[in-house]
Image (cartoon, rainbow, N blue to C red):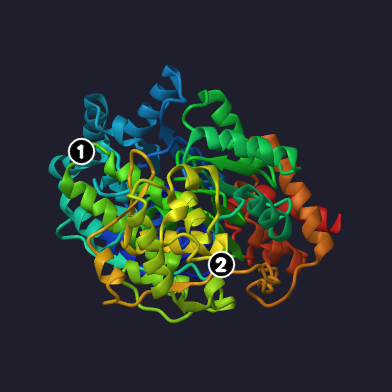
């Protein structure tokens, strides 16, 4: 790319990446970093973070070092850049000794525009010595939230990256993340010594994502119904907390006709890599995974992300749901949530090895997530407020589309807390509901709980209603689970409710209704014309064959939006084709004739 080193950013954006214009603050960030300034960039997934360091890498002399935590991201980014004619490479454990030597020699000789490395490798004495011998254009630290010790993706090796500033003070650094509350932002700045960096904060809003949180009843059946009704034969990710649940859920979905694959750290590396490759390169694959899967996955057409277990924090939830709809088309973030999830997360925090201060932070983060889950208002407003961004009701989350009813649950709460107290604070919700509903079971009889004054006082509320009451009491802090035995106990706040000093309002259990119509996929191009369906299908088939022949994901050849643009414009010449967003000079040279032959041959 040496011929374009000193070209203006907009020209490079068009000629290399095929985009006619910048989005949001991209141009300002590119200009600042290309001019030698440090930056912290907070931009949502799919907002165009990569361009914020890729373009300055082409505008500055030398090689840009990109710190990336995952092999998958490196490989996809390098494959995509190579398609554009950018000289990119990576150094990671997938390379043999000869391949490593080849890349290192290219770095020394200045024949690379970008080099992707993991933080562990970057901090090795051999690698730092190599950087001393090379000309470095900039350092880009991707997924910078990994530096936060309070965060959901903490990586200890990220703490060492401050050495870059000490060892290479004249080289600009850009740290990027899609997930950082104000506390995490401050921690990134401190730990990476970015005190003089400009901070660019884009909106955290992902308006194409519809957020839905349902009361967990039969989670598997609820998930299957969601996939069949809303996303049949479409790519998605299902997150579970344990490896066992991942394996069982993937196997069960497969028996139901869903092309589901498991992914977790307990699998052998070859199987994990094979499953990830299928997800990237085939259409309609659903990956069931722990959070070991996803960060750095560059697949733009993930149509849904589902959670069968409660995440640990809003940051984790936002990061994971953000993997849906990177292409800007409508996507879903769906979660099933129940009392057992709250108990499980609180138990995990209480039993963690961190100190009391660490646990308090984790409890605060969990409480914020519970507030989102229990909110009767707009999910998006609550989510964005957590990141310090004001917004108005979105009209495209479950609470906006079907506003939940709230009710004065003060009396029900008093009955529930009384049942906890009268039974000795030694029983879980199932037994307590039997007592409240007046069921003479073996346990209620054995413990003489059918003789208590609270026995049968809640017969007017059904079982689902009481589950909802107990879940919300725990979420509100009026009851807490005993982590050893699972019993529900009173808290310091319980007394005020029992004495009638405070009122308690709760969401009603939602009844299943007809689903609100979902926005159509964005099949209208930027120019306003719909794509020709037959041409679009031919282009998809051609792209699939081309991707298979090169062993790269289909989106590396062209994104769906670019194919839609071609199918809408039906270009007759290479000049016509060059005017479509996503087609830069190298892709035009490589694929232009084949596309025109496909369309008009």
Q: Residue at x 58, y 51 (%)?
A: 586
Q: Residue furthest front?
A: 451
Q: Residue furthest right?
A: 601
In this rendering, is residue 577 above or below 516? above
Nearest the viewer among 266 and 524 is: 266
Nearest the viewer among 494 and 242 is: 494
Mark 1 vs mark 2: in front: 2
In this rendering, is residue 243 above or below 337? above
* Residue 310 at least partly seen: no
Question: The residue tagged with tag 1: helix, strand or loop?
Answer: helix
Q: Residues within 10 Å of mark 2 (few under 14, many from 20)?
A: many
In this rendering, is residue 349 above or below 32? above
Q: Which residue is mark 2?
A: 210
Q: Residues within 10 Å of mark 1 (few under 14, many from 20)?
A: some
Q: Position of residue 379 (x, y in %)?
A: 46, 70
- Image quarter of residue 195: bottom left
Nearest the viewer among 521 and 445 is: 445
Q: Which residue is mark 1?
A: 160
């Amino acid at each position: 790319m040496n011929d374009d080193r000193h070209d203006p950013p907009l020209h490079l954006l068009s000629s290399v990446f095929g985009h006619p214009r910048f989005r949001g603050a991209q141009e300002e960030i590119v200009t600042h970093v290309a001019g030698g300034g440090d930056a912290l960039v907070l931009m949502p997934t799919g907002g165009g973070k990569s361009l914020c360091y890729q373009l300055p890498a082409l505008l500055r002399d030398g090689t840009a070092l990109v710190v990336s935590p995952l092999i998958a991201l490196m490989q996809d980014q390098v494959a995509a850049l190579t398609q554009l004619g950018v000289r990119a490479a990576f150094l990671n454990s997938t390379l043999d000794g000869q391949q490593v030597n080849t890349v290192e020699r290219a770095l020394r000789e200045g024949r690379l525009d970008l080099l992707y490395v993991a933080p562990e490798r970057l901090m090795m004495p051999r690698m730092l010595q190599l950087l001393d011998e090379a000309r470095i254009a900039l350092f880009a630290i991707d997924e910078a939230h990994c530096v936060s010790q309070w965060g959901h993706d903490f990586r200890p090796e990220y703490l060492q990256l401050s050495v870059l500033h000490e060892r290479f003070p004249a080289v600009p650094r850009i740290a990027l993340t899609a997930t950082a509350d104000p506390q995490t932002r401050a921690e990134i700045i401190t730990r990476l010594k970015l005190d003089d960096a400009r901070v660019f904060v884009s909106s955290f809003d992902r308006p194409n994502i519809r957020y839905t949180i349902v009361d967990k009843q039969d989670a598997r059946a609820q998930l299957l119904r969601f996939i069949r009704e809303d996303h049949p034969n479409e790519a998605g990710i299902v997150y579970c907390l344990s490896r066992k649940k991942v394996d069982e859920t993937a196997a069960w979905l497969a028996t139901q006709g869903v092309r589901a694959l498991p992914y977790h750290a307990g699998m052998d590396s070859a199987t994990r890599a094979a499953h990830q490759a299928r997800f990237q390169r085939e259409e309609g694959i659903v990956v069931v995974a722990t959070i070991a899967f996803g960060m750095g996955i560059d697949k733009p057409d993930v149509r849904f992300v589902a959670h069968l277990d409660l995440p640990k924090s809003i940051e984790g939830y936002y990061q994971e749901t953000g993997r849906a709809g990177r292409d800007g088309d409508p996507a879903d973030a769906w979660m099933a949530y129940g009392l057992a999830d709250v108990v499980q997360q609180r138990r995990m925090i209480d039993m963690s090895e961190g100190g009391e201060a660490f646990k308090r932070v984790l409890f605060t983060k969990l409480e914020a997530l519970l507030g989102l889950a229990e909110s009767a208002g707009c999910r998006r407003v609550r989510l964005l407020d957590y990141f310090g961004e004001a917004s108005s009701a979105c009209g495209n989350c479950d609470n906006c589309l079907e506003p939940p009813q709230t009710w004065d649950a003060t009396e029900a709460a008093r009955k529930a807390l009384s049942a906890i107290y009268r039974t000795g604070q030694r029983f879980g919700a199932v037994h307590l509901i039997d007592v409240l509903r007046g069921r003479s079971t073996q346990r209620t009889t054995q413990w003489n709980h059918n003789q208590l004054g609270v026995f049968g006082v809640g017969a007017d509320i059904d079982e689902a209603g009481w589950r909802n009451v107990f879940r919300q009491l725990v979420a509100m802090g009026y009851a807490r689970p005993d982590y050893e035995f699972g019993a529900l106990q009173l808290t310091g706040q319980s007394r005020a409710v029992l004495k009638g000093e405070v009122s308690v309002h709760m969401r009603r259990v939602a009844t299943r209704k007809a689903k609100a119509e979902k926005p159509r996929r964005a099949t209208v191009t930027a120019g306003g014309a719909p794509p020709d369906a037959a041409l679009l299908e031919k282009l998809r088939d051609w792209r699939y064959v081309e991707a298979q022949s090169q062993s790269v994901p289909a989106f590396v050849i062209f994104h769906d939006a670019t194919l839609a643009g071609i199918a809408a414009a039906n270009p007759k010449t290479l000049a016509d084709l060059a005017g479509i967003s996503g087609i830069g000079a190298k892709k035009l040279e490589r694929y232009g004739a084949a596309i025109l032959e496909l369309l008009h041959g």
